[in-house]
Amino acid sequence: MNTYLENFIAFINQKSEYGKKLISIKQQKKNGKDKFYIHPIYNNYKLSGVNIEYNSLPGDSILKLKVFDVIITKLLDSENLTLRKGNAQKKGATLGKQDLEDDTLENLIALKCYNKSEGSVYRRMPVIANILVEAGICENIRSGSKLRLIS
């Protein structure tokens, strides 16, 4: 486990008091005026994921810890610790095509963590990015189109 993931887990554990409290996350693109909540999920006293409570996502929006591990690992392997997020919200965007090409984080998560196929849509990256920014692990750059690890 890398230091970034350890710091992410520590953030979730501390902010939620090990699952006793919800964590409020600010929406970065909306000037912090809008927010959503995450509920930590524990298995055998270890963080295994988070459940997202946000009005634009389905009620069963569980993000496994693997999602954050995959993103952090990919960012560590990238040039300048930076990658494009992808834009599933753009009209006509589908995995493997315009705005969700193979080199985007949104495409990577959909294919590697959720077994989605090319041509489908997966819209979780804005929420995931906001969680990583709030945890102090990443920062949004270039008007929010890229995500960079904070070194």
Image (tube, rainbow, N blue to C red):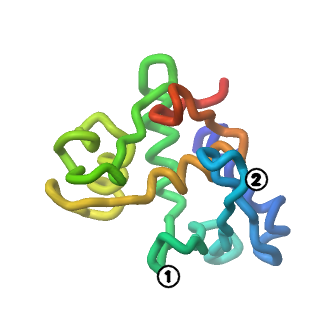
CA separation in Å, label 1 and label 2: 25 Å
Q: Quadrant of the C terminus?
A: top right
Q: Which residue is mark 1?
A: 59
Q: Quadrant of the N terminus?
A: top right
Residue 41 in the figure: left or right of residue 76:
right
Give me the disc on residue 120.
none
Residue 18's quadrant in the figure? bottom right
Given contact means CB atoms under 8 Å apart, are the residues at marks 1 and 2 in contact? no
Residue 94, can we see it? Answer: no
Could you tell me the amino acid type at mark 1?
Answer: Gly
Residue 63 image point, x, y percent:
50, 65
Residue 140, can we see it? Answer: yes
Could you tell me the amino acid type at mark 2?
Answer: Ala
Q: Nearer the viewer, residue 8 or 143?
A: 143
Closer to the chain start, of discs 1 and 2, is 2
- For label 2, the crowd category at 10 Å Cα-Cα, with few meaning under 14, some 14 to 19 and many 20 or more, is some
Q: Which residue is mark 2?
A: 10
Residue 11 image point, x, y percent:
76, 53
Q: Going by the picture, which residue comes out furthest to the bottom?
A: 59
Q: Residue at 20%, 40% (x, y): give it.
A: 98
Q: Residue at 42%, 24% (x, y): give it.
A: 78
When the figure is inspected, residue 12 is found, relative to residue 99, above or below; the finding is below
Residue 31 image point, x, y percent:
69, 45
Q: Residue at 47%, 38% (x, y): give it.
A: 73
- For label 1, the crowd category at 10 Å Cα-Cα, with few meaning under 14, some 14 to 19 and many 20 or more, is few
Residue 17 in the figure: left or right of residue 140:
right
When the figure is inspected, residue 88 is found, relative to residue 101, above or below; the finding is below
Residue 47's quadrant in the figure? bottom right
Q: Residue at 80%, 67% (x, y): give it.
A: 16
